Amino acid sequence: MAIRENFSYTDMEEWLNEKRVTEIECLVPDLTGVARGKILPRGKFTEDRGMRIPEAVLGMTVTGNSPTDDPAYDRAISATDRDMILKADPTTITMVPWATDPTAQVIHDCYFADGRLVDFAPRSVLRRVLKLYEEKGWNPVVAPELEFYLTDKISDPDLPLKAPIGRSGRAETSRQVYSIDAVNEFDPLFEDIYDYCDMMGLDVDTLIHEIGAGQMEINFLHGEPLGLADKVFFFKRTLREAALKHHMYATFMAKPMAGEPGSAMHIHQSVVDAKSGRNIFSNEDGSPSQAFKYYIGGLQRYMPSAMAIVAPYVNSYRRLVKHTAAPINIQWGIDNRTVGFRVPESGVQDRRVENRIIGSDANPYLALAVTLACGYLGMTEHLEPTPITTGSAYDMKYELPQGLPEALSALRAEEKLRTVLGERFIDVYAAIKDLEHQEFMTVISPWEREHLLLHV
């Protein structure tokens, strides 16, 4: 479900003229999900322009550094710092609601000089997986649910984050899950968010207050994966801008506050037959199909090896602990929120599985690509799931990597994921995450100063 269905370059030109756009933000989602690119005057934005940015833009850590001594990375990223050619995807054109002058934004795909898609670009990785589904006559359908925190603005990163002040003049100090009044504390902000999303065609659905102080969740209407990834990418940017306008921060860190639950990106997923439109997770008599069971089996088999993609930072693993509304294993169950893979109660056509392992800090393109890849491998390899979990999965053992180095070792070792997601993507991604971990290890935390300085 693109933002603008079947929009051609000619349609985009006419739309820009109708909106009297004066500037265009040409965006490329990088491996962290950050918007990179260039800003052009309207008159310079043409189909044959062939705008370029360095290939290394897609090979940087969240701090902006690049690996220097990783042979696999060096084979993937050109040592000559060559350019990528950017081509706009007209279906993603939308306005920038917070801009002073009429400004549009459009997502671009990255190409090599010979016309091939840059295979380690996030949109390219997702396209690669969707192509595998297309070859089988399947259309995956997804619906992301994105959790985030609103926090007070703070300029010193050494200080802990705090819940923001609402309309009452007070910050939250207790659990306010599903509280309408707690959401209404930030009415001016959420009115802007809904207005912005409506202007951009982001198809957001419900907004709820989650468990944590200042923690919210936004749900997206279901649709096709690339379009939904684009919308999540746009939404993250939009929410941050709206929050700043109201003198707050909005953060998608997996675990921004000690003592509060982490934030997830739960992804509901099903698969329909491309010809008939029938949900292949259900048999004609309404019972769960074998494909449905295989899909869950694939998630169970491969998601532990994919953790470095869906839990991409050191901070991500602080979320995945017992009794904090986050899974610790790969169990599955019916309407069971303690498992990694929850099957909601639903009708026959709506049968789906919810991946609850993914953090809100994950790149939406890569998160969708890898969870669909796991399900695809399950269906094509006929992987049976474990018996259903009916009680609390928190009482069971850990089955997921508990840190980034462990997760990266598992990712590098899983040949099937390398095949489905792309060899060069895995090499570039793993090298970047290795460097991020090295950078993290140079920082001394307050816990270390508190407990080790005078006691060891």
Image (cartoon, rainbow, N blue to C red):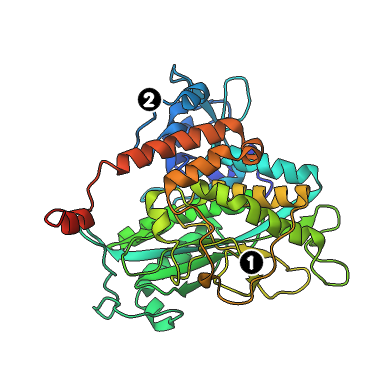
- Callout 2: SS: loop
Circle 2 residue: 68
Q: Quadrant of residue 450?
A: bottom left
Q: Nearer the viewer, residue 97 or 327?
A: 327
Query: Which is nearer the eye, 135 or 250?
Result: 135
| Up-down relation of residue 359 to residue 388 (above or below) | above
Residue marked by disc 1: 332
Q: Nearer the viewer, mark 1 or mark 2?
A: 1
| Circles 1 and 2: CB atoms closer than 8 Å | no
Q: Is residue 63 left or right of residue 107?
A: left
Which residue lies at the image location 50% right of the left edge and 41% below the top edge?
409
Identify which residue, 75 or 184, lies in the foreground: 75
Q: Is 321 situated left or right of 393 in this image?
A: left
Q: Is residue 438 left or right of residue 11?
A: left
Q: Position of residue 192 (x, y in %)?
A: 41, 65
Query: Does residue 454 lie above or below 392 as drawn?
Result: above
Density class for disc 1 (Cα within 10 Å; few <14, some 14-19, many ≥20) is many
Question: Residue 244 appears at what percent x and percent y?
Answer: 31, 58
Placement of the N terminus among the 4 image quadrants: bottom right
Q: Residue furthest right?
A: 284
Camera-nearest residue between 342 and 234? 342
Give neighbour class at mark 2: few <14, some 14-19, many 20+ (Cα, 10 Å).
few
Disc 1 element: strand
